[in-house]
Image (spheres, rainbow, N blue to C red):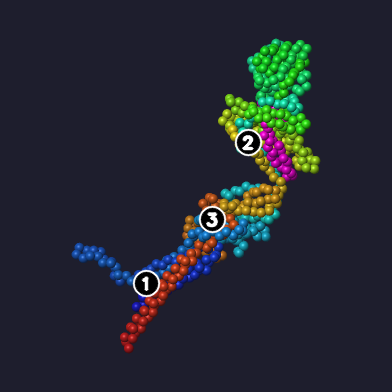
Amino acid sequence: MMRSLFSGVSGLKGHQTRMDVICNNIANVNATGFKSSRVTFADTLSQTQTGASAPADNIGGTNPKQIGLGTGVASIDLLFTDGSIQSTGKNTDLCLSGNGLFVVKSGNDIYYTRDGAFEFDAEGNYVLPGSGHYVQGWMAKDGVLATNGAIENIIVKAGKSMAAKASDKITYENNLNAAAPIITNISGGTNIKIKGTAVVAGVEPDENIKLGAPLSSLVITSGYLPDNNTADDIYVIKAMGWSGSASGTVTASEGAPVKIYLTRDGKDYIVYATGGSFNADDIISGTTTVSYVSGGIIEGYITAATATTEKPVTLTLSDGTTVVQTSGTYNLGAGLPITTTVNVYDTLGNAHTLPIYFTKTKVSSEEGNTWTVSLTTDVSETSATIKENEGTVTTATLEPISLHFTTSGQYDSAKNVSKTAKLTLTNGAKETQEIMIDLTSLTQYAGNNTVKGTGNGNAAGTLKSVSIDSTGIITGVYTNGVKQAEAQVAVAQFTNASGLTKTGSSLYQESNNSGTANIKTAIDLGVTITPSALEMSNVDIANEFSDMIITQRGFQSNSKIITVGDEMLETLINMKR
């Protein structure tokens, strides 16, 4: 008779425990990041009256006779399923989805939580405001994050200052239009003198070149004729597009010879033409001889001109269009300069706008096209003056860069040579500043000119706001327009998160059955952080109410066991009366 009473009592205790867990779940239905629990029952030890017997030759086997002694709580399981995401609009709130927990610290003790209702305190510490626990993660240094070290308190102070950083690199990217037309005719403007390079074929020139050498030995790819028509020399220029169809007549005689300048292997040479008249075709085909004379009359031919408002230049392009320019320098056989501007910063954080021009200067189906990168539209100029506020003048120098592309439109790393621009400053910053120009990311395909340059460096600034992304990176936005990483929130993952020990205030600690924390970034662990949101409790009210009814009925049933057992005991006692 007593066994039934004890069974009933164990049932009452078990269902009371289950009711306590259900009530705790319901009480925390609105607790941020709360994880509900459930109770599972298992029967206790049974009293064996007779054991089981095995079958014999002339009798079958028998089962054991056992009387159960009640029930017990087998486990109280922590259900680590995700709760719903509740948007809050507060930029320091974080919602974690997946198998992970935030890491917080108090003193030397490490805790874990799903409560992401964080904020910055008066000292810039990122904390759980209800308990003051420090949120753990990795701090960035000058905007660079290293997440392979130990975690630490995240601190981002309001009004944090950013020092000025001088620019030392300009990076260009995107595309130059391979189909950009070239200039086939120039009229108007002011003719200019450009000296370049010519190639001599079949003759090895030196300072004592033989008189009478035929001009057929000279391969001249371009030339220059001054605008006064009485000058005594032709400046021969490589890759400037002097073709056989060029117009212009050169008259050379004993009394008015023509001096021709050549450059080979870095040395300048001079040869002289005398006798008769010849044009560009004559020079290319080589119908005139070379001898030592002086003087000469040059007529009519223009290879380059500078445009002004008073003396504009009319350019005819290879696509048949005509363009009138009122500024800049333009070369026959070259393309129209593509203008880019890049902001760079000096050591004091002052911004300087640096103009850089891209001009297509050679078209070759064998070697690929060549562009010239320069500081002005005149591809031979090596310096430019930048006038800035308050009368400040900055001088920029850059040796023109020959930018080679392969016939497939790729940057030709075998031919290209990197060069550096120099700024000469007069504003109290470091006087000379060198800035490397990186062109390796450029391509040259037919289409549009999308070339764009970006300089590094920045002016001084002050932190004005922060934002947090889905990877837990805290980004600072500064008054100088710079955005940089300040820190990254750490996430811990456990093999058995349900085995963690609750310590109150929505905090957990490791237990013997939780495993050790694997602390990484959200991306590394495959979890997701939702900024400006919190995780709601994962308590299912409908399920809890259903469990409550079941638990109530179970409790009532077990109480009935005790009542009936008591009545049976009373009947037994009354048999003696």
Residue 78, disc: none
Q: Residues within 10 Å of mark 1 (few under 14, many from 20)?
A: some
Residue projecting furthest to the front: 321
Q: CA distance from mark 1 to mark 3?
A: 43 Å
The residue singled out by tag 1 in the image is 69
- In the rendered structure, which disc, 1 or 3, sits on the residue that comes first in sequence? 1
Give the foreground label among 1 and 3.
3
Of callouts 2 and 3, which one flags the residue occurring earlier in the amino acid sequence? 2
Give the crowd class for mark 2: few <14, some 14-19, many >=20 residues within 10 Å.
some
The quarter of the displayed image where residue 309 is located: top right
Instruction: Look at the numbered disc 2 and give the secondary structure of its residue.
Output: loop
Q: According to the image, label 2 marks what residue? A: 449
Which residue position is annotated with label 3?
A: 492
**Which of the pair 90/257 is nearer the observer?**
257
Q: Amino acid at mark 3?
A: Ala
Relative to 319, is 544 above or below? below
Q: Is 565 rendered above or below residue 75? A: below
Q: Secondary structure at mark 3?
A: strand
| Lateral position of residue 168 relative to residue 12, left or right | right
| Residue 10 in sight in this render | no
Q: Quadrant of residue 96?
A: bottom right
